[in-house]
Amino acid sequence: MCPRAKLDHVEGVRSVRSVRSVRTNKLFVNDLMIQQLLDHSDFRGQSHGYVSLAFQDEYTNENVVKEAKEHLGYAKATIIKMHKFVLNILSREDYKRKN
């Protein structure tokens, strides 16, 4: 029996509101990191939102883990950038409702 290859991967989950808000905004049309993350996203239903696979490779040595961690850093930074943008929108909408 042959052992199964272990795969290292990085997934990120984002809300539907975040993806729709960022996808339709002109500020991010030329943002390669955001566009790549959105291009590799699948909608998994209202409870899970969008899921992206930011990295996947067969585990052959520790270099794969190092590379996965690099991609995780890129994915985190990109998701944080997207969420900050959406939170800013939500703050403005909340302010408008109160005033």
Image (spheres, rainbow, N blue to C red):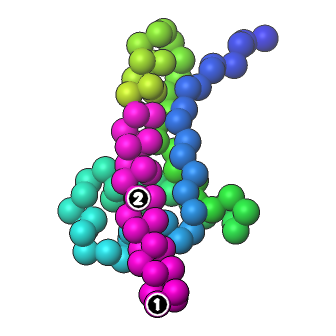
Q: Which residue in the protein does label 1 denote?
A: 99
Q: CA distance from mark 2 to mark 1?
A: 23 Å
Query: Is 44 in the magenta?
Result: no
N-terminal label among 2 and 1: 2
At 45% from the left and 58% from the top, the residue drawn is 83
Q: Nearer the viewer, residue 39 or 46?
A: 46
Tell me if residue 63 comes above or below residue 51 in the rendering: above
Q: In terms of secondary structure, where does tag 1 sit?
A: loop
- Coordinates of residue 56 in the picture (x, y in percent): 50, 33
Q: Which residues fall within the magenta stretch?
A: 71-99
| Residue type of the residue flagged with mark 2 | Lys
How packed mark 1 is, by other alpha carbons closer than 10 Å (few <14, some 14-19, many 20 or more), is few
- Coordinates of residue 19 in the picture (x, y in percent): 47, 66
At 44% from the left and 51% from the top, the residue drawn is 79
For this orientation, the residue located farthest to the left is 30
Tell me if residue 14 comes above or below residue 46 in the rendering: above
Residue 89 occupies which quadrant of the picture? bottom left
User: Is residue 39 something one can see in this rendering?
Assistant: no
| Residue type of the residue flagged with mark 1 | Asn
Disc on res. 6: none
Q: Nearer the viewer, residue 58 or 1?
A: 58
How packed mark 2 is, by other alpha carbons closer than 10 Å (few <14, some 14-19, many 20 or more), is few
Query: Is 86 in the magenta?
Result: yes
Disc on res. 84: 2
At 70% from the left and 68% from the top, the residue drawn is 46
- Coordinates of residue 64 in the picture (x, y in percent): 45, 18
Residue 32 occupies which quadrant of the picture? bottom left
Judge left or right: residue 46 versus residue 99: right
- Coordinates of residue 12 in the picture (x, y in percent): 54, 46
User: Is residue 30 something one can see in this rendering?
Assistant: yes
Q: In terms of secondary structure, where does tag 2 sit?
A: helix
